[in-house]
Image: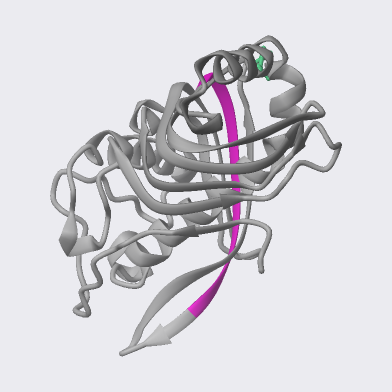
Amino acid sequence: MKPVSALLLLVVYTQAAKFPPNFKKCNRKEPDLDKCLKEAAQIGLTQSVKYYPQIGLPSFNPLEVSELKIAPGSQSVVNVEQNFKNCKFYGINEAKIDEFKFDFEGKSTHGRGVIPEIKMLCEYEVNGKILLLAVVGSGPSTIILKNVNVTVHFDYEEVPKNGKTYVHFTTNKVTLDPDFVSFNFENLFNGDKQLGDGINKVLNENYREVYADVKSGYEEGLGLVVQQIINNMFSKVSMEEALD
Ligand SMILES: *[C@@H]1O[C@H](CO)[C@@H](O)[C@H](O)[C@H]1NC(C)=O
């Protein structure tokens, strides 16, 4: 099994598509392409509170992820696999994009920005040890990341189809650096309130240590989610349609 996996239910339309008129288009040859791409990405994100089935773009507020599995941390702080289901992510659409660029030669894209708050509501299942304490349970969970510095890097390959060029993103590297994290796992230990409250308190009091251990799992998880979304979109929108 892969250490991290994510599953989204995305509607797949087979016909080619154009960006809706409220999206911004850039010209590959314009002198300030990076600035235009940054604006286009920002506008796209702002528009994405709506669902755009014609270009395969789901709503980003909330962004729904049916399944997200995060591997145990590597430093034995969080010695538990976190299985999340029916997740709703709020706040990604509020990202302020500071940089977004395509490297057409190197076939990669790179972005950087800040998200004021990511709120992740899911149904969780855990069974393992956190900070050496046995933790078991399932129920609703809320995880909040505040003031998150985000970088994304995607490599892509070009896929020619029907005389057009489509891009397929092959690998991703995402970093998420929040300045504050809070956890709330409801119904731990089959609803034993005292034990459950105790674990949540320990998690929150030690959020830096806890997050440091699960950080790469969360980054890989969100990276996969974003990769699936943009692949879904760019399997419909060719480079010729995305850029003038
Ligand atoms: C986010 O980036 C800003 C600007 O580079 C920096 O001042 C801040 O410390 C960073 N925050 C975190 C949590 O890394």
141 shown above or below 138: above
Q: Quadrant of residue 57?
A: bottom left
Residue 47 pos. (x, y %): 22, 38
135 shown above or below 192: below
Q: Which residues are magenta?
A: 145-158
Image position of 136 (left or right of 48) = right
Q: Residue at x 43, y 36 (%)?
A: 139
Q: Nearer the viewer, residue 67 or 104?
A: 67
Image position of 62 (left or right of 65) = left
Q: Quadrant of residue 48?
A: top left
Ligand 1: image quarter: top right
Q: Nearer the viewer, residue 159 or 201?
A: 201
Q: Is residue 199 magenta?
A: no
Residue 160 pos. (x, y %): 43, 85
175 shown above or below 155: above
Q: Quadrant of residue 103?
A: bottom right
Pick the quarter of the image with the N terminus: bottom right
